[in-house]
Image: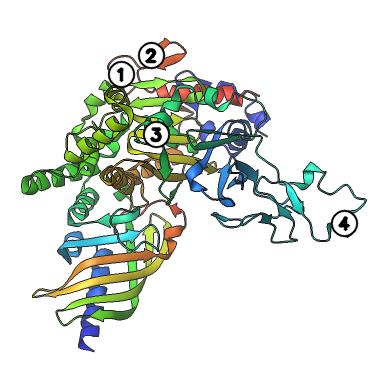
Amino acid sequence: MLQERIPDLSKCVEPDRVRREVYTDPEIFELEMQRIHEQVWIYCGHESQVPKAGDYYTVQIGRQPMLMVRGADGRISVLYNRCPHRGNMMCGDRHGNAGEFFRCSYHAWTFQHDGTLRSIPMMESGYAGTRYGRDNPDCSMKRAARVESYRGFVFASLAKDGPALTEFLGASRVAFDDMCDRAPAGQVEIVPNCFRVIQHSNWKIFLENQLDALHPSVVHQSTGRAAHEVEKQIEKRTGSAPLSYHMLSAFATVTIDKWDNFQTLNYPYGHCILTGYMGLRPKDPDTVAYEKTLIKAYGKQRTEEILAVNIHHVLIYPGLSVQSPLQQLRAVRPLGVDRTLTEIWHFRLKGAPEAIYRRSLAYYNLVNSPATLINADDLENFWKCHQGLASDGGDWVSFGRHHGRDIEKDGRVETAANCGTSEAPMRNQMKAWAQYMRA
Amino acid sequence: MKQQHEVEQFLYRQADLLDSKRWQDWIDLFAPDGVYWMPADPSHKHWDGVPSIFAEDRNLMDVRMKRVLHPDAWSQRPMWGTNHVVSNVVIQKASPKGEIEVRSRFHMMELRRDDVRHFAGSYTHHLKKTKDGYRIKLQRVDMTNAQAAYDYVLQVWV
């Protein structure tokens, strides 16, 4: 029993280090699902994924199989993917359209899109005088306790109490604001393909890597150098190389010492922001044309404000990593203590020229597809990390880089000047973890 | 018959170069404007402008090859290998100028460390006959596994 082995989970976390069991113990994993993922706001999907009445998408929240569905009144519900009759899974496909109502494939109980019981075959003769029927809420599909959406991004919480979505997101809202504001129409829409990749490692290893500014020069050197070499060849031949080469070669040209120049900002609930390094505001004709459409929509001053937002990654703990300037996000779905599914989506800036979509699409394909030139080496390291932590070769994971130099102000922790490679984001995530896990 | 035989031999060679990790020789099978494409969705008609698992011209193929050969490509350190079987070769179209569209099926087994994975699907090749033999204008790879979650990633072309 976990209780006997580790009576107090908060003792697993010290300010600058964490016990290895936090990553490898299946019972701790079960508790995490219960106390973190099935409590807090988890990203379900974007409203544009389910444009029509009856459109649904399945989504895993913690260990719970859920459905995000659009009703005839336009409202989005998040339901447990389960018939209340005998527990049959309601929708067996990953996504689709339920039609005018849900109909269970086992005994044909039917439900409105918001989960309310609609009919049961021979309801009157079968159930008269029993406790079952329309008046009994247990005969409807169970809903997520809370559903809220921020700028089109739908979140659900399976706990009825807790902070409202905007309070929970706090400063990390900038992920969605930055993404949507960059669209002349102020909105994004989903590109209807999802890349799904399984990592053979604990979910926290992926999240801790997202804002780890020391790793890119080490892990992505091979791709950075290869891309830089080819970029130079293309420039020599044609004068200029596509921006996607720059996005890859930055991993090599931004040398290891320069990563300290960036900054991470760390917030309550474990959210963190890494400032940008790729310099994604070139002066090519595509960018100039795009900036004109922004000025037309927002005016010059507001456009400058929008384009001045300098973000690489926003991490929304415990399940979302957003790259707002490139309109993509990765949702983390823990499948087991050593198996993690990432669902990777790309968005289109409404009203922006096609060239801008294609630019971020190139990044989506090269970095985030299942044939990724970047994450292949990350996943190799995550697996090796998990293997090492499962051994008795040591008890602790260290997060000591630049520890003690962080600057705390207005409820956030900033890394000090020239401390961009600080392990502050990991310390911040584990601080939130310990708070959630306290019984 | 002769054409069928030539095309089959070409497709077998393409697969053999991948299995033998002769990356440059494999890239050289492509025409200068040739494209290797693995769609993310079987309904997609053209590689340009849609999400793709691979959509690579020769420049990007060069990046992938150079990456794989770099000593610090960590994911390349463990022993791995593949074995393709190509079959069901049917020429769809052939023009008098030597432009051929051919469909075939493949099955690929991959070993990485101690783990075996299987990938299968269809190839559509747009070939052009040159004085040096056939060259690939487009290699479209529709992988049956493409719609499922990927357990780990694909390192090189299939």
Query: Share a chain, discs 3 and 1?
Result: yes
Chain bearing mark 2: A
Helix, strand or loop for disc 2: loop
Chain bearing mark 3: A
Residue type marked 4 = Glu
At 32% across and 75% down in the image, what residue appears? B103
The span from disc 3 to disc 1 (Cα, nearest Å) is: 34 Å
| Labels 3 & 1 near each other (Cβ < 8 A) | no
Helix, strand or loop for disc 4: helix
Q: Residues within 10 Å of mark 2 (few under 14, many from 20)?
A: many
Tell me which numbered mark, 2 or 1, is placed earlier along the sequence. Answer: 2
Chain bearing mark 4: A
Residue that sits furthest to the left in the current view: A236
The residue singled out by tag 2 in the image is A406
Of marks 4 and 3, the one in the foreground: 3
Q: Residues within 10 Å of mark 4 (few under 14, many from 20)?
A: few
Helix, strand or loop for disc 1: loop
| Labels 2 & 1 near each other (Cβ < 8 A) | yes
The residue singled out by tag 4 in the image is A124
Tell me which numbered mark, 4 or 1, is placed earlier along the sequence. Answer: 4
